[in-house]
Amino acid sequence: MQPAVTGWRRPESLLLLMAIAMPLAFGTWQALINNFAIERAAFTGADIGLLQSLREVPGFLAFTFIFLLAWMREQTLAIVSLLLLGLGVAATGLLPSFTGLMVTTFVMSIGFHYFETARNSLTLQWLEKQRTAAFMGRMIAAGSGAALVIYGLIWLLIEQGGFSMTTVYMVGGGLTVALAIGAWLAFPHFPEKVEQHKKLFLRRRYGLYYTITFLAGARRQIFVVFAGFLLVEKFGFDASAIALMFLANMALNTVAGPAIGRLIGRLGDRRALTWEYVGLACVFTAYAFVETAWVAVALYILDHLFFAMSIAIRTYFQKIADPAEIAPTAGIAFTINHIALVSPSAVFLVGAALALASLACARLIPDDPRPGREWIFSPPLTGETERAPA
């Protein structure tokens, strides 16, 4: 028998707790990795690219997430993955070598990518469609608030306290481990509203969603791999400067996240994604030619604000999806998101081109997406209950 869901022990509370727990570890890893790899492990730019490529391998394999659901509940998998993320980050500073960073990064990344897949799936399953965008905005704010705390703590520990990056990695990873254990002990196992399919498939009617997800992944990976490294290599940012930049970024997202969620609810998926991709095309083009440090920082922060609007990709899918296909499609979508890891010479101009391609796809989303009405060229429905073919 399922425990009673009362007071704060609700699915929404668990989602918010997990949204807080993840950035404590991942934010620590992300804020320090370039400086740690260069200063402690003597990494070159090519080594950083290899490390980041390895980090994305578990994302490419995210489709295997569905196989684990045959013997593990999705909620349990999310918490176990969060625990693995924290352990991987905590161990990062203990192994300052090429091999050590490769191993800890891979472990951390498995936890991160499986967790994100499970969390996205559970969010779409547990929330009503009309509430999803606004609540996901709250999740962004919660995660950004947690990141704000950890970036501030990084700055205090390193700049003011004189602690080593090894100690900071253990603090950030350890906090996530503690919250994962707390989530396991404090919350009941919530029953599935609809039993999820336990097999892989591709649906023709999800084609536009797959395409937008693919382009978003290609564009995002370019920025994740090169933007932070550029700040360190070209403009000489040290670990405390990177942490302060992230601090300002997350402070803005903490305030803007709920507003962005509500805005998406009002604008609709197509208009929200249109604004995102127009903005990102401008940001990537500017980043390709930036020569001033403060401009680069401003562009970095703008990118994260626009990225928050990608909530609309998930709310669009929620509206067109068969409820039983959310979990397997979440795994496939995360894999598609990681297929396009590229490293061209003019990386940011390529990112701008990808943003424009995404814009073209976003304009194909109808104003009223639902099963059978996945894109603007879908044939008119003959009845409200008609079900779209696979």
Image (cartoon, helix red, strand yellow):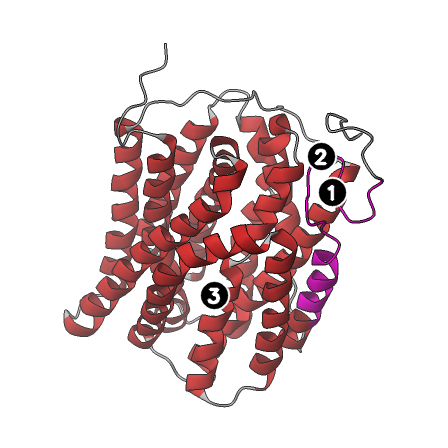
Q: Position of residue 233 (x, y in %)?
A: 46, 81
- Residue contact at pointers 1 and 3, CB within 8 angstroms: no
Report the mark closest to the observer, 1 or 3. Answer: 1
x 77%, y 38%: residue: 205
Q: Position of residue 390 (x, y in %)?
A: 78, 31
Q: Which residues are magenta?
A: 353-379
Magenta region includes residue 363: yes
Mark 3 vs mark 2: which is more N-terminal? 3
- C-alpha distance separating marks 2 and 1: 6 Å
Is residue 137 among the parts visible in the rendering? yes
**The residue under label 3 is which amino acid type?**
Leu
- C-alpha distance separating marks 3 and 2: 30 Å
**The residue under label 2 is which amino acid type?**
Pro
**Which secondary structure type mostly characterizes the magenta part of the structure?**
loop
Q: Secondary structure at mark 1?
A: loop
Residue at the disc numbered 3: 305
- C-alpha distance separating marks 1 and 3: 27 Å
Q: Position of residue 189 (x, y in %)?
A: 37, 22
Question: For residue 374, which numbered disc appears in the image?
Answer: 1
Magenta region includes residue 241: no
Question: For residue 371, which numbered disc appears in the image?
Answer: 2
Is residue 93 among the parts visible in the rendering? no
